Amino acid sequence: MEGSPNMTARVFVSLKKTVLDPQGQTIRAALSSRGYGNIEDVRQGKVFEIQVSAERTKAHQELEEIARTILANPVIEDYRVEWLEN
């Protein structure tokens, strides 16, 4: 949109704590076998970096909806939206 500020958001999506994370467990085991015995748990996830050109309030509302309905599966995943300074 012309005249709208460009903003950048990062959306972090991760499995809920109650959901088993086999990939995280595999990574933790690999770290342990390489001598990193102080690592007690690893949870893996996804990060999306999204450029938005919209009025601030509208951008925040849209990104919340996108994260909740498209990027994350609310049954097994949590998400967090973080806005970066441009």
Image (tube, rainbow, N blue to C red):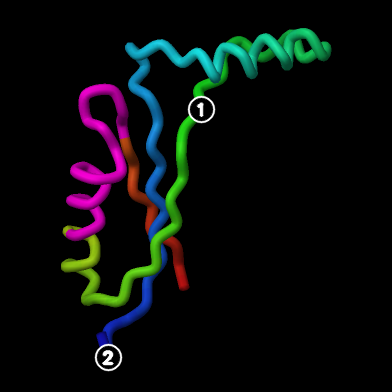
Q: Residue at x 32, y 38 (%)?
A: 79
Q: Secondary structure at mark 2?
A: loop
Position above or below: 81 against 26: below
Residue that numbered label 1 is attached to: 44
Position above or below: 16 against 2: above
Identify which amino acid the numbered label 2 is placed on. Answer: Glu
How far apart are the alpha carbons under marks 1 and 2?
38 Å
Is 19 on the left or on the right of 46, as rendered?
A: left
Q: Which of the 4 quarters of the picture holds residue 35?
A: top right
Position above or below: 14 against 54: above
Is 22 on the left or on the right of 31, as rendered?
A: left
Q: Which mark is residue 2?
A: 2
Q: Residue at x 64, y 14 (%)?
A: 28
Q: Earlier in the sequence, mark 1 or mark 2?
A: 2
Residue farthest toward the bottom in the current orientation of the protein: 3
- Are discs 1 and 2 less than 8 Å apart at CB? no
Residue 38, x across and y down, in percent: 71, 11
> Local crowd at mark 2 within 10 Å, few (<14), some, or many (≥20)?
few
